[in-house]
Image: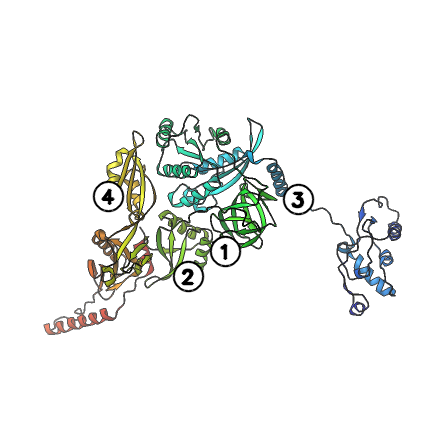
Amino acid sequence: MRPCPCLRRLLPPRRQWPLRTVLPSRAAAITAGNSSSSGGRSGSTTTEPRRLFSEPTTFMSHVQALPTSQTIPTAAITTTQPLRQLIPTNGRQLNSLQLDHAARLGGQSGRRGYASAAPKETTPDQRKAAALEKRIAAIPIERFRNFCIVAHIDHGKSTLSDRLLEYTGTISAGDGNKQVLDKLDVERERGITVKAQTCTMLYHHQKDKLDYLLHLVDTPGHVDFRAEVTRSYASCGGALLLVDASQGVQAQTVANFYLAFAQGLTLVPVVNKIDLASADVERALGQLQSAFELDTSDTVKISAKTGLGIGEVLPAVIENVPAPVGDEKKPLRMLLVDSWYDTFRGVILLVRIFDGTVRAGDKLVSFATANQYTVGEVGIQHPGPVPQSSLRAGQVGYIFFNPGMRKIQDAKMGDTFTKVGYENVVEMYPGFEEPKPMVFVAAFPTDQDHYQKLADSIGQLVLNDRSVTLQKDHSEALGAGWRLGFLGSLHCSVFQDRLRQEHGADIIITEPAVPTKIVWSTGKEEVVTNPAHFPDTDDHRMRTARVYEPFVLATITLPDEYLGRVIEICEAARGMQKSIEYFHSTQVILKYEMPTSSLVDDLFGRLKGVSKGYATLDYEDAGWRESDLVKLNLLVNKKAVDAVTKIVHSSVVNRLGRQWVTKFKEHVDRQMFEIVIQAAAGRRIVARETLKPFRKDVLAKLHASDITRRKKLLEKQKAGRKRLRAVGNVVIDQASFQKFLQK
């Protein structure tokens, strides 16, 4: 209820001064008045103090300052008469109407008449988080362990993570716990880990009867996502080196071992899948000892699927992995390990605390961007986000800012954060090397009307996958689109699946291409990622220019019985053998330097085919090599189709050109005029196919006519076809391109 305008002029100006206490005489008057108005009901007297009002009202300007130690004994105020006695007039004369009106403003409804509110009830999740935080606070940094699981793809990393979460009580045991840490649908569908996931666990060690704080990182196994593994190592002090008992040491196992060894991590060997009929534990132990010189006497033998031996994993981690080193009394030194984008909170950071403590409200500064932020919330993954009051040295957790960080580009991987004012005291962390795209493709919508919707979908995916590069592109045949850069062929395939599953978008993907470097005669270097922009061979500048293509060092592990066939494939891919090593009686490690273009051209699929699935592949960048490269174009009636342009080595031009024209002819519709399909390298035509036109029988209406009449009609038809061929355009629908580009 608000006072009428006529009364507002009589009341003094409004002040923010809550009525907290009254004089003892006034308190006695209120108690007496309320007791009499209660009708002598029992239980109406109590000793609990109660304030009169919970927020300022229009008559608060009349209240004078009173001692804060004097409070009103409780009784519910139900009448306005005591309130009229409490309103000081400050020497002014107020009539009864003004007093009644002011009293009603203060005493109406429990919203204003009661000062104290009932205590806020906590939810079960809040009580659980509080109990978890209390238990964590009692654990010193000496009982922290940060470790990750590394292995070749499909050796059981995610399954082992599920069993460890169940064993520590982080999640409830059940048959539905499959790939709990994998958040993406494509990860569950394919059974692979694409993005490293983290979880904090509490473990009560039976040996010393103490609690330990364990931080687990489940890393990807495929080589395309090696950057995720590298960042995971920065937050860990050790790693479980997982080996499949039936497969043994494979390519990615070797790569992960040397990567972890270079980071100085303590490795705990674990042999998985010992319950399989094809398991050969002794062979796996022998490979670990001969290839990595590891002591296999304390190797943990488990079956993550059945849970056999899981109880021996965490004691081995506690005994072998060192505790993190840090001092929570020093200034904050925080490393940014990973980040992802949330629609409501902005960029959420996964951080590792080396020194100091961070809590909500702290003002932080970034060393990489010099931007300042205010922490909105800190917490841990358990396995979902659980807010905490603070994160201290040795812990790994998440934080987000308020106001939030809106650009994912501001979250530089390997960046160091500290509190404002300590920039000159804290040493910056060396940081990470940003992953570089190795495969480029052009993406176009199947229908140009869906361009804007697809642009929004791609933009949302790129926010959570910083390794994808994005720039706009255009094709004469397919319209507006984008040129995307990926870490590898699997990365590209996963991105396409996520577009379809999460956003319901279908796109046309061109053949993968690799960047090419051109060094002109002036010394200027130019990197070309779009094959359509590569100069033709008849360009006069190309006579003195040098062309380079990227190479990789491929490591292939395989059984020795398939060695001959694998070497044939590597030689056909223009590979140069670097070494061959037998690390077991039946296993071979083969190293080749080969062009990246050969690698992305389904080399891994061919290796799997000739080795019955036993060959494994890992690779790393080996720099640029000078090469004889040309641009191969597909011409339809002498017009280039830019969507099919490709940069290839001169030795494969004829073979690839013949494949192109033969396959493209199958997907082009016949017209009323002749269609000529050609593959050209510069001005040289390397292959040709002709699509015959529909032909009308102009002689059908003639029965017994003169021969000159027949010739006249045929010549007229010939002239018309010539004119139609000159002005006619070949319209190739996008479905034809989609069928041609898919493998």
* Count of marks placed on residues: 4
Decide: is 324 above or below 680.
above
Q: Which is more N-terminal, label 1 or label 2?
A: 1
Q: Nearer the viewer, mark 3 or mark 4?
A: 4
Q: Give the residue type that dot 1 points to.
A: Lys
Q: Residues within 10 Å of mark 4 (few under 14, many from 20)?
A: few
Q: Secondary structure at mark 2?
A: helix
How far apart, in angstroms, are the residues tagged by discs 3 and 4? 68 Å
Residues 588 and 304: in front is 588
Q: Amino acid at mark 3?
A: Thr
Q: Secondary structure at mark 3?
A: loop
Query: Of callouts 3 and 4, which one flags the residue occurring earlier in the amino acid sequence?
Result: 3
The residue indicated by pointer 1 is 407
Q: Earlier in the sequence, mark 2 or mark 3?
A: 3
* Quadrant location of the N terminus in the rendered image: bottom right
Q: Secondary structure at mark 1?
A: loop
Q: Calculate the distance from the C-alpha at mark 4 to the C-alpha at mark 1.
A: 46 Å
Instruction: Say how the picture is coloured.
Output: rainbow
Q: Which residue is mark 4?
A: 571
Q: Is residue 47 left or right of residue 214?
A: right
The amino acid at mark 2 is: Tyr
> Which-is-in-front pick, marks 2 and 1?
1
